Amino acid sequence: MDAERNMTTHEQPVSGPDDFVDLPIAAFWRRTLAFIFDVTILIGLGFILCFGLFGPLAHLGPWARLLGVAIALAYFGILNSRIGRGQTIGKRLLKVEVVGTDGGHLSVRRSLGRYSVLAVPVFLNGAWIPSASTNIPLLVIMDLLTVGIGGAILYLYVFNRKTRQSLHDLAARTYVVQATPRHEPLEVAEPEADTTYVPAEERPAGVWRGHFVVIGIWLVGVLAVSTVFPLVVDDVGDLKPVVERLQATGDFYLVSAGFVRTSSDGEQTDDLIVTCLMKENLPEPDRLQLQYEIAVIVFEEYPQVRDKDFLTVEVVYACDLGLARVDRGYALQYALTDWESIVPPIPGE
């Protein structure tokens, strides 16, 4: 009878009214430390793979980042599910776990969906996207997915103090709570001093609606800045022929071009930077010749470069998993007057 009674108690749902889980919400510092620990593990694994398998992974170019996505999805998706009892290594050390609104652990599919919301801004940030530097609609979409969604996740993580649910928690209808032993009749532990635990009769209907207003304003602001900024930056659209011609050579996975304006001692300088992700690592003589050829193309396709102070031509051979990145980058930066003697003759002179 006791065993039967214990089993019945354990299987009872632990959610209360208004879909608010009847377990003490994990303290902010515990959840943060657990996340830092998990990220450190994945970054370390990323560097081990990049240094140990640099050649094969660098040869994959931007597609190597998909391997990083798969590793992170497997780590967080599987361990945060019922397979890992809702706990990554970091969560296990800090004694917190991911549960659904019924207090139970997630299916693998649901856990993967939860992490995918977080993975989008994380792995798109810094990713090499074709023509992203000159394609304004693509720039806007990228900013919304990285800065917009990423900012919303961070905002809710810090300021949603009632349920401590961030955007990925809300999407998957999950909570991060203090870990509770599941082999005994479920009893709620005493919450820590900085732990949110709301009695059933005092529970809110959900996340404060004001948070969604703030997020909406944030997304509109990101959209506005992302749309207007490229239009007020000189010549961004004029760089498109440079990018397209370099991409058409077939020597590079991706090409980007943009301007950097710096000020020093009251003097302002404008630098045009062209960066190319190489498909193979070249010996130094061939690499220098390639950089000279890139410079010639820049002068041919963008004559306005003569109005700038510097031209930087950078070629990169990199292992980029998203978790970690190891670059072998080679940059040539000269004043425009110096390029004349380096790459004679400059077209148009």
Image: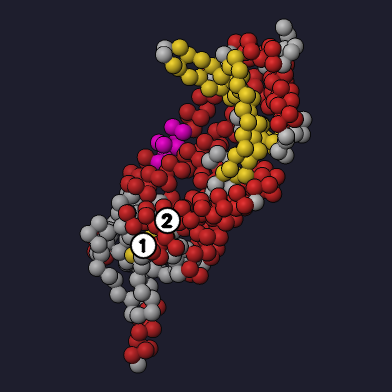
Q: Are marks 2 and 1 in contact (CB under 8 Å)?
A: yes
Q: Position of residue 345 (x, y in %)?
A: 75, 11
Secondary structure mostly seen in magenta is: helix
Q: For the residue labelled by badge 2, is the local secondary structure a helix, a strand or a loop?
A: helix
- Determine the residue positioned at 39% across, 68% down: 103
Distance in Å between CA atoms under marks 2 and 1 = 10 Å
The residue tagged 1 is 94
**Residue in front for this viewpoint, 262 or 204:** 262
The stretch of residues the image draws in magenta is 215-222
Decide: few, some or many residues near mark 1? Use Cα within 10 Å; few <14, some 14-19, many ≥20. Answer: many
Q: Quadrant of the N terminus?
A: bottom left
Q: Position of residue 266 (x, y in %)?
A: 42, 12
- From this view, report whether residue 170 is shown above or below residue 320: below
- Determine the residue positioned at 42% across, 60% down: 90
- Determine the residue positioned at 45% across, 62% down: 88
Residue 278, located in which quarter of the rendered image?
top right
Residue 100 seen anywhere in this rendered image of the structure = no
The residue tagged 2 is 37
Is residue 97 in the magenta section? no
The residue most toward the bottom is: 1
- From this view, report whether residue 230 is shown above or below residue 114: above
Residue 197 seen anywhere in this rendered image of the structure = yes
- Amino acid type at circle 2 is Phe
- Horizontally, is 320 left or right of 101 in the view? right
Label whose residue precedes the other's in the sequence (2 or 1): 2
The residue most toward the right is: 249
Decide: few, some or many residues near mark 2? Use Cα within 10 Å; few <14, some 14-19, many ≥20. Answer: some
- Amino acid type at circle 1 is Leu
- Horizontally, is 334 left or right of 157 in the view? right
Q: Position of residue 254 (x, y in %)?
A: 67, 35
